[in-house]
Image: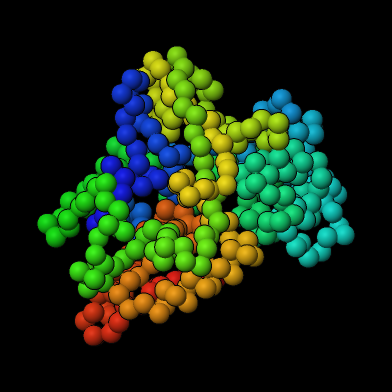
Amino acid sequence: MLDERSHLGGNCHTTRDTDSGVMLHVYGPHIFHTDNKEVWDYVNHYGEMMPYVNRVKAISAGRVYTLPINLLTINQFFGKTFSPNEAKAFIAGMARKDITDPRNFEEQALSMLGDDIYRAFFYGYTRKQWGVEPTALPASILKRLPVRFNYDDNYFQHKYQGIPKLGYTAIIERILDAPKIELRLNARFEDIDASDYQHIFYTGQVDRYFNYRLGRLGYRTLDFEKFSADGDFQGTAVINYCDQDVPYTRITEHKHFAPWEADTFSKSVCYREFSKACGAEDIPYYPIRLVEEKKLLADYVSLANAQNNVTFLGRLGTYRYLDMDVTIAEAMKAADQTRQLLQSGQNIPAFFVDPLQ
């Protein structure tokens, strides 16, 4: 196994801050959530998952609200005391009736929530996060965001939710602690001779594997501004900043991602997150997957399918936005299918999941 960084874990890498002792999610926080018991049991086999509920706050026009949009958000924003049915009727009255087939993110939001909530919570944040007008984004992005007419502020609705007690890197170290696995850190794939290996499972960028010969696929990346504070800085793990005139998208306070130990620290460590287009030297985070990218992806998929000794996996290898549980589930499935194919003498495919879907 090759990793070009000096540590394991990729963007899930966690480590203790040397000054405060706080467990840091170095490349941004990751909350594990899934309904897949097999995946949940798998990660718990390698590390203890502690209960954690993601309760996000948002600041819009100088006021603090709770996310996702729920009954408290609606009552706070409009200064009401609606019951669930009253809130449903009120929001239905705000929704744009003339948009029957939303073509993009903005139209989807307006057809669900109306202009006031859209402008307050989604428009500015979305422009900062993706770097384009919301009209350029697919409607499907907003369909993943819940709207609730009760006071449930749990950001996720999955049965199993948590964060590893000793961090994600400790789990990955245990997974790789096996006699037949050789680990090489600070090692680039381009610096090895791929012909020395019977088969390669590649989880880097699919366009990078082909040395970007057809062009670069588009990603968004993040810059982090780390700062420390005495005591408690913001009183919660995540606060989104929805206004366009605030350059960062959110502030995360990392001791709150470990509530079982948060009170033991006299200092706190926070990060401001700035979203931007991913350059050649940046770490790719979010595949954009707009029309032009999907056309280019299709060409790279054709190149990949013409190979006979490499399989592309993960968020970068398949150019899809994947949560951790889905990535693990697909890797487990790929391992099982690879075993079966080898036993039957069949070739291992370039993709186990169609990246174009």
Q: Does residue 251 appear left or right of residue 64 in this picture?
A: left
Q: Does residue 158 appear left or right of residue 335 in this picture?
A: right
Q: Does residue 18 appear left or right of residue 179 in this picture?
A: right
**Above or below, comparing residue 99 to residue 23 in the picture:** below
Q: Residue shown at 55%/56% (left/top)?
A: 218
Q: Nearer the viewer, residue 11 or 284?
A: 284
**Residue 246: image location, x then y, percent:** 66, 30
**Above or below, comparing residue 32 to residue 234 in the picture:** below
Report the coloring of the rendering.
rainbow
**Residue 251: image location, x then y, percent:** 54, 30
Q: Residue shown at 29%/37% (left/top)?
A: 166
**Residue 9: image location, x then y, percent:** 33, 46
Callout count: 0
Q: Does residue 310 appear left or right of residue 182 in this picture?
A: right
Query: Is residue 182 something that shows in the picture?
Result: yes
Which residue of the protein is positioned furthest toward the front in this rendering? 213
In which quadrant is the C terminus drawn? bottom right
Q: Residue shown at 27%/46% (left/top)?
A: 186
In which quadrant is the N terminus drawn? bottom left
Q: Nearer the viewer, residue 120 or 289?
A: 289
Which residue of the protein is positioned furthest toward the left in this rendering? 179
Q: Nearer the viewer, residue 216 or 96?
A: 216
Q: Residue shown at 73%/59% (left/top)?
A: 104
Q: Quadrant of residue 248?
A: top right
**Residue 61: image location, x then y, percent:** 74, 28
**Above or below, comparing residue 14 to residue 177 in the picture:** above
Query: Is residue 175 something that shows in the picture?
Result: no
